[in-house]
Image (spheres, rainbow, N blue to C red):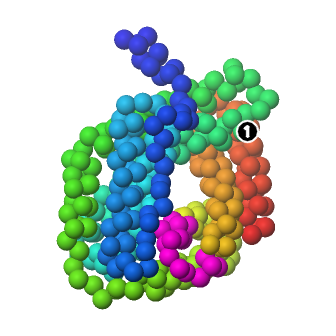
Amino acid sequence: MAKKHFARQQRPFSYSMRSRTQARTPRLRPAMSCAAALKHIALECLRQLMANTPSIGKGNDAEPIHQGRVAIRRLRTALKTFAPLIRGRRWKTIAGDLKWLAGIFGKARDLDVLALETLPAIQVGLSSETMKPALAALSAARWDARAACRVALASRRWRTLPTRLLDGLTSLPPSHLDNLPRFASHALKRQRADMRRLWKQKGHSAEQLHELRKQGKKLRYAIEFFSGLELNGSHKRFLNKLRGLLQALGDYNDAVSAREWCKHLEPEGLRILLEQRLDERADQAEAKMLAF
């Protein structure tokens, strides 16, 4: 039994090109109602999520968890953007369920990034023997995180979520919001203002930068949702800059998350060495942020 368990834990994780299902930009038209636009966006997000969940339950590939998490984030952004159309207990429950699933996928994704991107970038010059304790601890943590994903996907809470979402979308109440381009312009203007407010805060602690990154992702998804409409061209120009900022914020967040994970790593000498390298990586990412 122990041998089987050991062999199972040694199976490699990877970024496979197989079964990769990414987001697609919904085709919105200016003449659409806001309710119709919400349906198009939400159904596309649900398609991406449903296409990736079977692979999460069966394999070791890191990409389905990544794409599933992206789908949830995009769907949550859509529901918040169109919040005036979806008030009530039903939608509050759906939002809570999506947040719950996002948290579980998020833990697994963070560990994948640590193992496949952050750690390889900072372990240059360290022998495999030196890194063995960290790699063993990380492998165990990733298996536990995947097990949590599988439990969540086997739960009634998840199994009923797509149906509840579809039922809600097919029974949206009448709304006075019938000018989609105007609604989209106001929504993007509001989200850009939120982004500027967070950026202008003094200090920029790790928590503040994390919130800035989350708001930036929401804004990016919203701009992408409405990219087919005849909106102010400044939104598309801003999107290019935003992607660069989000990359720097992501690198910073990955380094901070990795450092948090290292806190309980043994032996102490390895932990201190990795923490120093992660601090350097975070400083480099922060320097990039200041360029925007």
In magenta, the rendered stretch is 219-235
Q: Residue at x 60, y 41 (%)?
A: 114
Instruction: Residue 164 in the image: state x and y as whole percent.
Output: 21, 59
Instruction: Residue 205 in the image: state x and y as whole percent.
Output: 64, 66
The answer to whether 131 is drawn above or below residue 255 in the figure is above
Residue 30 visible in the picture:
yes
- Is residue 223 shown in magenta? yes
Q: Is residue 174 left or right of residue 292?
A: left
Q: Is residue 182 left or right of residue 265?
A: left
Give the secondary structure at mark 1.
Answer: helix
Q: Residue at x 24, y 44 (%)?
A: 155
The answer to whether 146 is drawn above or below residue 193 in the figure is above
Residue 190 visible in the picture:
no
| Quadrant of image for the C terminus | bottom right
- Is residue 7 shown in magenta? no
Find residue 121 and report its image quarter.
top right
Find residue 53 and report its image quarter.
top left
Packing grade of label 1 (10 A; few <14, some 14-19, many >=20) is some
Please state which amino acid type lies under the numbered disc 1. Answer: Ile
Residue marked by disc 1: 122
Instruction: Residue 136 in the image: state x and y as whole percent.
Output: 56, 26
- Residue closer to the observer: 9 or 217: 217
